[in-house]
Image: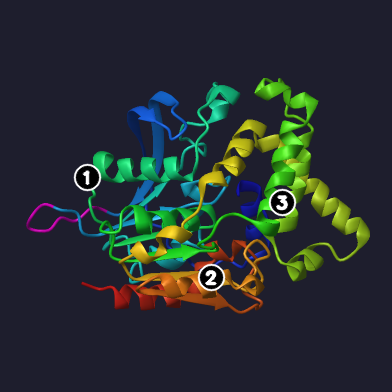
Amino acid sequence: MRALLLLILLVAPLPAAAQIPAIVEADHLVRDFLFASGETLPALRMHYRTVGTPQRDASGRVRNAVLVLHGTGGTGAQFTGANFAGELFGPGQLLDAAKYFIVMPDSIGHGRSSKPSDGLRAAFPRYGYEDMVRAQHHLMTKGLGVSRLRLVMGTSMGGMHTWLWAQRYPDAMDALLPLASLPDQIAGRNRAWRRVAIDAIRLDPTWANGEYTAQPRGLRTVAQMLWLAGGNPVIRRRQAPTLAEADRVLDEYVETYVRTGDANDVLYALEASRDYDPAPGLDRITAPLLAVNSADDIINPPELGVLEREIRRVPRGRAVVLPFSDSTVGHGTHTMAAVWKHHLEELLRASAR
């Protein structure tokens, strides 16, 4: 999430002399996009960023594409900084831009892709994760001419999208890397904090059914919930070692979030997880899949045992839970590639053609 990412960057060290390749940005329009709700958009805009160049085999098929999917409230831009691109996309690195064609879209409702705050507000179609994945697939196949991907990977919501890609399009990729996610419905505490945030907006009279002229007061509660859920307690204590410091850090975070965010956009993004349920199709996943979570992620805590239980149903699946360390930053560890890239290396080696 955008404001959450700002906090992560404040506490995470940057790699020295990170070499970030050139980023190319563009839009793909999907005409008359039909949502699962039955609603349509005459033109759904999918904004995306790319690094590298597509390489084709003798039959003309692109063979080096990598799809990277962001989390709730984020954009593809979160993968262009030192902690991700600087660790993966440079010369000789695992996803060297000279070797791979890396695509980082803004999903529906996020960034520069079509979203409620563009003008439709609460009249924007009610999208779900299935809609988001279908639009990503359209971008890759119809927009970029990519029918098979070397790798599909994602963080948080993007990790959940990766689980859906794995079973909706089982022949479309060589390997899968979902990060900071679980292959099961949003439930328990994960649903509870989202529900608190959703209700804070929907039940706020100043939301005015989405037709507000100033951001509704409930957006402050959303920001507070994100601050609580996004980091681990050790980092939060380090940031805010006294009562006064805790109030100051939280207030600054909330003010930034309210100033830069939009209530309708975040409301839609949080509600979109309602149709996420990959569990029934886990046995249909055929590509090698490596799921990576971190032990200090309070959104997907390891004590639930969900990942360990469900990964057994994935024919070529494996799961790793990174131990708590000075390098992990809670849920946001998903964007700290230095912590988990050796596992990506294993996956790429195991799935090599």
Q: Is residue 223 above or below residue 9?
A: above
Between 49 and 16, the one lying in front of the other is 49
Q: CA distance from mark 1 to mark 2?
A: 33 Å
Quarter occupied by residue 244 = bottom right
Q: Which mark is residue 193?
A: 3
Which of discs 1 and 2 lies nearer the camera? The answer is 2
Magenta range is: 53-60
Among the two numbered marks 3 and 1 on one chain, the one whose residue lies closer to the N terminus: 1
Quadrant the C terminus occupies = bottom left
Q: CA distance from mark 3 to mark 1?
A: 39 Å
Q: Which mark is residue 307?
A: 2
Quarter occupied by residue 48 = top left
Three-letter amino acid code of the residue under disc 1: Gly
Secondary-structure class at tag 2: helix
Residue 70 showing in the rendered view? yes
| Residue 272 left/right relative to 325 | left
Between 156 and 277, the one lying in front of the other is 277
Q: CA distance from mark 2 to mark 3?
A: 20 Å
In x, y percent, where is residue 265?
60, 35
Three-letter amino acid code of the residue under disc 2: Leu
Q: Residue at x 65, y 33 (%)?
A: 262
Q: Residue at x 33, y 66 (%)?
A: 175
- Residue on which the image places disc 1: 145
Secondary-structure class at tag 3: helix
- The answer to whether mark 3 and mark 1 are in CB contact below 8 A is no
